[in-house]
Amino acid sequence: MFDGPETYPGCLLECYRPPIFLQILGDATVLLRDCIAIVGSRKPTPEGLRAASDLAGQLATAGLVVVSGLAYGIDKAAHVGCLDAGGQTVAVLGSSVDEIYPSIHAPIARTIAGNGGGAVISEFHLHMQPTVYTFPQRNRVISGLSLGVLVVEAAKESGSLITANFALEQNREVFAIPGSIYAPQHVGTNALIKSGAKLVQSVQDVLDELPGFKAAPEEHPSEALSQQELTIAGCIQTGCTSVDLLCERLACTAPQVLSVLTSLELRGLLVRRGPDSFAIVQPL
């Protein structure tokens, strides 16, 4: 709820039928800060999840609040990526705040609402379950709160495209990450780019359209690696692309090598090319 006109987010007044009230769990003042929305597919690719998480964290570090819809897939990745970076995020629900949907994301909602993580909000009265009509209503609030909307992955008739259309109506920036012409998850995003959305390949592509925000200096990936991780990564780059070869070259046991490979994979520095084949995806 709002104590007066000065506490109502001014950008929301540009929505179609601005919410008369909002139920808010968490820090209501976060709604008055500059926000960026990140939305996308509920069935994303691993690359889409990584992009949403990484960009959310980088945008949060640049000083923006990340807004999304707490849905499966890209929305969840955006919220978690923002929180992991120490930022604040807003989850806009298509249900009431006492009926978190999907229920499996209730722990994320509690994290957002507590300890300065941001706010969970809804314009629906208590005990309201989500319906096919409440999500489009929710989407206009997501875009309305934000300076721009970044669509990570979206199929041809994705709800994320509704959010992007609301953003255009509200004179907001629209950003989209390009993808394969053969992948259904990218039909919507590629169409957005074709119609004028800004193509995004890095966080700077977003920040260039938002004066006053700068990306934090990037740390080189190798700075956070142990000597053993650097050694194994170096061996892979020179052609040792199987566990047996690495064990032979380094005189290590298979469990030791596999542990390091898993660590590099989780950091996004290594990908599996086959059951026993690996490649480094970022130069170290």
Image (cartoon, rainbow, N blue to C red):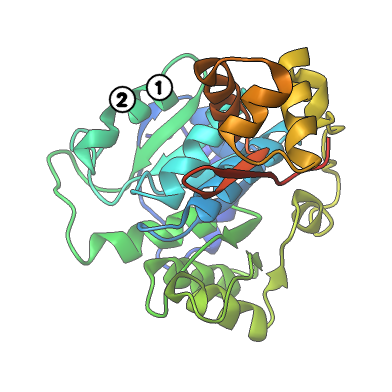
Q: Answer whether residue 226 is visible to the viewer in this image.
A: no
Label 2 neighbour load within 10 Å: few <14, some 14-19, many 20+? few
Which residue is nearer to you in this view: 240 or 218? 240
In the displayed structure, does residue 271 sit left or right of residue 112? right
Report how many numbered discs are placed on residues in the image: 2
Instruction: Quickly name the residue at label 1.
Output: 111
Residue kind at label 2, given as amino acid type: Pro
Name the residue: 59% across, 60% down.
149
- The quadrant of the picture occupied by the N terminus is top left
Label 1 neighbour load within 10 Å: few <14, some 14-19, many 20+? some
Which residue is nearer to you in this view: 134 or 216? 216
Q: Position of residue 130 (x, y in %)?
A: 18, 53
Residue 81: numbered disc: none
Q: Position of residue 223 (x, y in %)?
A: 82, 21
Distance Cα–Cα, label 1 vs label 2: 6 Å
In the displayed structure, does residue 136 sit left or right of residue 174? left
- Label 2 sits on a secondary structure element that is helix
Q: Answer whether residue 54 is visible to the viewer in this image.
A: yes
Q: Position of residue 71 (x, y in %)?
A: 34, 48
Which residue, as the protein is rendered here, is positioned at the far bottom?
195
- On screen, residue 178 above or below 152: below
Residue kind at label 1, given as amino acid type: Thr
- Label 1 sits on a secondary structure element that is helix
Instruction: Quickly name the residue at label 2.
Output: 107
Disc 1 vs disc 2: Cβ atoms closer than 8 Å?
A: yes
In the displayed structure, does residue 24 sit left or right of residue 12? left
Q: Position of residue 153 (x, y in %)?
A: 50, 64
Snapshot quadrant of residue 259:
top right
Name the residue: 28% across, 52% down.
94
Snapshot quadrant of residue 171:
bottom right
- The quadrant of the picture occupied by the C terminus is top right
